[in-house]
Image (cartoon, rainbow, N blue to C red):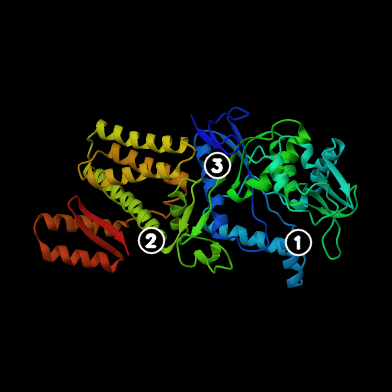
Amino acid sequence: MIQIYNSQSRQKEDFIPIRPGKVGIYCCGPTVYDYFHIGNARPFIMFDVLRTYLESQGFEVTFVQNFTDVDDKMIERAQREGTTVKELGDRFIAEYWQDARALGVRPASVHPRATEHMEEMIRVIQGLMDKGLAYESGGSVYYNTPGFEEYGKLSGQNLEDLDAGARVSVDEEKRSPLDFVLWKAEKPGEPSWDSPWGRGRPGWHIECSAMSMNYLGDHFDIHCGGQDLLFPHHENEVAQSEGYTGHPFVNYWMHNGFINIDNSKMSKSAGNFFTVRDILKEYEAEDVRMLMLSAHYRSPLNFSRDMMAQAKASLTRLYTARERMDSLLAQAKQRGLLAQDEALLAQVEEIRGRFVSGMNNDFNTAEAMGALFELAYLANTRFNEGSAPQVLTRALQALQEMADIFGILKRDRAQVPDQVAALAKQREQARKQRDWATSDSLRQQMADLGWQVEDTPQGQKLRQG
């Protein structure tokens, strides 16, 4: 049974989809006014793994991730650069795709843009007004926060405490300091759309409610995003959506922890702010994924050169284990080995089971990652030239199955050309006859063809390069 830590109940719960065999997930996407940074990359990677794992368990997943393509930051930058908000959004959506592909993040089932869903947002806002949960003031529309009695239930904050601690509002149009804008009245030089309350544009929170319900229905399984979105963004989504429908909005809320840079909070003012584009100039994308997966998604994660070096070394261990098993399997097939080892095969399956157990435990990638390294250890200590092809084949399958869920070990296996394989076989025979001169000559011939030979207790190991 899969268990998920639900931010709303603040405990792990058994995962029971609303519709058997189908899962609807909404993940908050980027505001497209700049390249996305390493902190943004964490939810993109982690919830991509969540989706992939659920699919591996037989679920049909509809995964929705939005683009916020109109907001204050976009308007300010577009004005500064002398371009339009649409041109800016188009540009940085294209940049998002480039960086997401580089990180191995798959496209969502659908990527809705806020500017293409005005009708849906206006419909929800009007519905809230009809219920007395929203009001128009000065051409803008605000959510009547005190009118939703359960406000604060997601973040665990008390409405009375929030109201008592709120600063005096500088917006005279609002009835309460806690009220938030659903529709902003038009301002000169800003993009705007027609609405029953005059021309304007949506507030930030309403887009996610309208778009998630449009694609997943007004009650769906999982809503995820960064911990920084828990309050007020997701809290306001709950208030809007449940106020509009009169029933629960989301069954499971998932929030990933923050990323620190060298144990300090990332910020532009501190000079430790890195875009993914910056990071990928120095590190491989799979190394970045390894680092992200090394910690539970709810835990804070430290990003540093030392941590990246550890991630790279860990990934190399897995590649080396795969190469070793590939080599042993090729040798076993060449020698026509037919041996079986049911005990070792059972051990491989036990390791695969521990991976599943870790992922079922609130998608604990750190725990599940341990299974990959158990398999690597098995490859290095128990597998040899006499290992059964059946066991080696299943071990390789298990390793790749687990790695595929994590989006790693994607580099192609080097195919040994027939000419090199023939030289290797000759060299192996020469070594058995203790003909070291011929052995060295054959080694050099393979090196000239771009292949290095490593002599191990289990036999020759070929490596390209």
Number of marks in picture: 3
Kind of residue sitting beneath label 2: Ala
Tag 3 or tag 2, which sits nearer the N-term? 3
- x, y percent for residue 404: 45, 45
For this view, does 309 lie left or right of residue 99? left
Q: Residues within 10 Å of mark 2 (few under 14, many from 20)?
A: some
Q: Nearer the viewer, residue 6 or 285?
A: 6
The structure residue drawn at horizontal position 64% and vertical position 51%, both measured from the top left corner, is 29
Q: Quadrant of residue 247?
A: top right
> Which quarter of the figure is the C terminus placed in?
bottom left
Instruction: Tell whether label 1 touches label 2 (CB within 8 Å).
Output: no
The structure residue drawn at horizontal position 55% and vertical position 34%, both measured from the top left corner, is 59
Kind of residue sitting beneath label 3: Arg
For this view, does 254 lie left or right of residue 185? left
Q: Residues within 10 Å of mark 3 (few under 14, many from 20)?
A: many
Which residue is denoted by mark 2 in the rendering?
309
Which residue is denoted by mark 1 in the rendering?
86
Tag 3 or tag 1, which sits nearer the N-term? 3
Q: Quadrant of residue 127?
A: top right
- x, y percent for residue 231: 65, 47
The structure residue drawn at horizontal position 85% and vertical position 37%, both measured from the top left corner, is 132
Kind of residue sitting beneath label 1: Lys
Residue at the outermost left position: 434
Q: Secondary structure at mark 2?
A: helix
Tell which tag, 2 or 1, sits nearer the viewer.
2
Tell which tag, 2 or 3, sits nearer the viewer.
2
- x, y percent for residue 447: 26, 66
Which residue is denoted by mark 3 in the rendering?
51
Q: Secondary structure at mark 3?
A: helix
Q: Secondary structure at mark 1?
A: helix
Can residue 212 be seen from the camera position used here? Answer: no
Q: Residues within 10 Å of mark 1 (few under 14, many from 20)?
A: some
